[in-house]
Image (cartoon, rainbow, N blue to C red):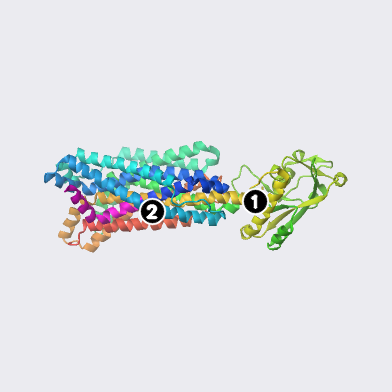
Amino acid sequence: MLVKLSLSSMRKMFKDYLVLLFGLTISISIFYMFETLAQNKTFIEANAMISSIVFIFHVGTFILGAITVLYIFYATSFMLTLRQKEMGMYMTLGAKKPKVTQLMFFETFFIGIVSLFIGLIVGVGLARGIAELFMWQLDFSGEGFEAFYPSSMITTILFYTALFFLTSIVNAWKISRKSVLGLLHADHKQDQVKVKGKKTIFGVIFAIILIGAGYYSMINIAKLEQLGVILAAVTITVGTYLVFISLLPYVVKKIKENRALNEKGINSFTLGQLRFRMQSLTKVLGTVAMLVALGLGAMTAGISFYHNVELQASAFYANDVAIHQPTAEDNEALEEMNITEKNTYHYKINEQGIYFLKDDLLENPPMIKQMNQASLELPESARVSDPLPDEKYAMQDLPDQWSTALSMEMNTGSQMFDDKEVYVVDAANYQSVNTDETFVVLVQVDDFTEYLPQLKKISQNQSELAESYRGETVENVQGKYGNYVAFKAIASGTIFMGLFLGIAFLMMMASVLMFKLLSTATTDTHRYSMLRKIGVRKSLLVKSIYRELFLLFLFPALAGLVHVLVGMQMFSFIIIEPYTKIWIPISIFLVIYGLYYWITVQMYKRIVLPSRY
């Protein structure tokens, strides 16, 4: 009988449960997708490039799992709040507390299992779609990939089943500890508003000091390194909570004391509602602000890293490609590109080493990157200006600029020629080397990314040449294109992880705030009812709801956004332009956040302003 009542109530409250189901489904599907991309052994072994970024998806699942634990406890507590009064009525009508406790366990676990089933189905489709995107982005084979992967399925089922089982026990335990009167009057409790001067001032000052220290750590992350990350995480988290615990209630109190603003329309009621809520919402708003920072930060960093790939690849190489012993196919590829600069350097190679003609190097000094350890900006390109010695010199004895030009720009290191010694010699010594002459071409083009197919073909030919010298397989030869491919592989994994983690965080964050606001909505019903009875128009009450909830959504959004804008400085030592395309994640955030705000308003209105009003 109780099960039938429970199912009937769940059908009646389907709209309330739908938001909870949606958030859980997104979390489960993304978790499964990350695990599938990380665990597909055949797929990983067939694509060496993917194996290098598997750790990204393992990190993603760990972070998502940790945040999901927090989210599920908040979300299921909302469900418990909705059902408390009804559970009390069952007990009043004669139901035994153990039966009601079992019923609460069943409902919580049932919602979790339904979301797990739907999430796995969505996750399989998501895994297939993202894998296809990877194959297209990185141009590799999808052979061996399985969207329905048993190992990932088992991992996801075990993790979420255990989590749902734990939360079901917690909810059942909470019900068992409450009396019948406590359940029946659960929505009649009030929060005391406490804003004390000295404690508030101390809390605000301490919060400013902590957040300032955290921002300093993020801006100077290159100097502080790991210590800076730890310091920023601790100080900003604690400082954020202190801002919402100490400063926000005080600010709302001062706004309410402004007579001109307070006495306009029904602002007195709206601000009174805000002030009434503050004590119970401070910790939740702090949590939401940190989740905003995590979610928006994950998306911003992922997108920024992806759009900085070409800049990152250019940080070490002034020339776009170096071609040893160009073939006819290489020359055809060069003809298809708009070349801005092209220089040729002759050399001879035998068993003893590689001999570059000094006259070529002096006639057209190659371009190199001038690395500046003190600056985080993109290094500038400049021609080698150091003089060359008059005699035969090994590369390691040359000035640094020439050593960089030969090893980096011309790719004469071990990856191409194994362990052969490199020399720069004058014309007489060059002629004495009894072997055929060959050459290397350094090329710069007008748009590197426009000629990726041609550069890929050249790189493949250079890899084959390196294999003939080294006697072993070479995946990618040293150079800007090789760097680009490696950075793009990591960036592609990072952008997908960042986007999906960010979206999951933002949805969970907005859900947490929504659940908290709706769980206290029943206590406001009698206030709105009284206002309607004394003649306040419904339209004014609706405007009051929009304003009140807008402010509650606005406070953590602003705090999280500021954290992200400053926090992107943490990536300045690995991302050349960390704020690239920042409007994309901010737009995604505003859409998700705005949607949850609108849903919250509609559900809140349905609770406090029933249709009969």
| Image position of 53 (left or right of 512) | right
Q: Secondary structure at mark 1?
A: helix
Q: Specify start and end residues of the magenta stretch as a single range.
A: 1-24
Task: Give percent across and percent down for residue 474.
Answer: 66, 46
Which residue ends up furthest to the left in the rendered image?
A: 93
Secondary structure mostly seen in magenta is: helix
Can residue 450 be seen here? The reply is yes
| Image position of 98 (left or right of 368) | left
For badge 1, the amino acid type reads: Lys
For badge 2, the amino acid type reads: Ile
Within-10-Å neighbours for mark 2: few <14, some 14–19, many 20+: some
| Image position of 193 (left or right of 241) | left
Residue plotted at (30% across, 41% down): 165
Q: Nearer the viewer, residue 486 or 393?
A: 486
> Which residue was labeled with disc 2?
121
Task: Give percent across and percent down for residue 483.
Answer: 62, 49
Residue 480, disc: 1
Magenta includes 22?
A: yes
Residue plotted at (14% across, 47% down): 89
Contact (CB < 8 A) between labels 1 and 2? no
Q: Secondary structure at mark 2?
A: helix
Task: Give percent across and percent down for residue 98.
Answer: 18, 39
Q: Is residue 11 above or below residue 193?
A: below
* Snapshot quadrant of residue 192: top left
Q: Is residue 606 above or below residue 349?
A: below
Magenta includes 32?
A: no
Q: Nearer the viewer, residue 538 or 112?
A: 112
Q: Quadrant of the C terminus?
A: bottom left
Residue plotted at (67% across, 47% down): 370
